Image (spheres, grey):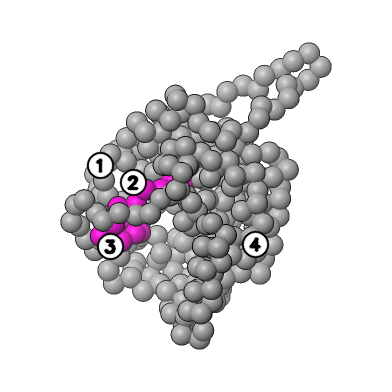
Amino acid sequence: MTATIVPLPMERLEAGGLAPPPPTPSELSENQRSFLDRFGYLAIDRITTPADVAAIRTEIERLFHRKAGYEEGMFFDFAGSEASDGSFNVPQMCGPHRFAPALLNTEFYRNALSIARQVLGPDAKLTQDHVIMKPAGSAGPTPWHQDEAFGDPGLDYHEISFWLALQDVDEINGCMSFVPGSHRRGVVPHAHSGGDPKVHAVDCSAAFDPALAVSCPLPAGGCTLHTTTTIHGAGPNRSAAPRWAYVVVIGTAPTPATVKRSYPWLEGRETARMRRRRGWLLRGGALVQGWRKVQAKLGGR
């Protein structure tokens, strides 16, 4: 993936060692808000503390170890069709907070919620969260896409995704990259990833120049923000260690689409995840899902 690298600022030095870390932000500056509105993405070098990052990663690795949510289709292969031997190209888990509620008691989540409400209004709340892990030495990139391309074409979504780096990330292990200003194009055409309807991921098939993309390396505890229509992707993990990212999506209620449209790339999809989920719902999962919605409403989420 070809992209322009934006260097991180140098750490400040004081006599006797490094300066104390600045407080983690719970709101954006006017310049940051203007940048997000103009370009559709934003990078923050530090949204939470090292201790918070360590706690989040511990919870997530525990969930991944037991493949929490696999039977209900919440643990699946984002970039592949799931091999018969049970291996995954790029494993993803949706809704990890359902299995580890402590994830919503973190400084990261509190700061993300505060920032989202600053941008979207006081009614903004959690709409989803997920984890993506790229195994060491994995060759597959995250395809260029817009998040809203996975949604209902009859709705417009008003959400911000917060992508938290759980270790230092750069172009070697697959940091995020964004096409500036692409969010103003609305939802553009996509296609089945690799032409395979059994794969969860979709690829942006609209004309754009990937060379214009901006790469966003981050230290652990850094975060990127982007809107639902910002074209983005991430390169493969060519490092010797897994690359972990925790994503929280916060927004207000969707509204009827202002433009009539269809998403043919979602038609005819039949992934292993979808089949597992249908079976789980029929075996009583619908009751579990209903109870979770009640709990979320009572909890203000």
Query: Which residue carries the number 4 mark?
Result: 100
Residue at the outermost top position: 15
Q: Disc 4 versus disc 3: distance between alpha carbons?
A: 33 Å
Residue 101 horizontal side relative to residue 193, left or right: right
Hey, what amino acid is under mark 2?
A: Thr
Q: Earlier in the sequence, mark 4 or mark 1?
A: 4
Instruction: Tell me the SS state at disc 4.
Output: loop
The quadrant in which residue 138 appears is: bottom right
Instruction: Tell me the SS state at disc 3.
Output: helix
127 or 162, nearer to the observer: 127
Q: Earlier in the sequence, mark 4 or mark 2?
A: 4
Pointer 4 with pointer 1, Cβ within 8 A: no
Q: Mark number for residue 185?
A: 1
Q: Mark number for residue 265?
A: 3
Pointer 3 with pointer 2, Cβ within 8 A: no
Residue at the outermost left position: 260
Q: Earlier in the sequence, mark 2 or mark 1?
A: 1
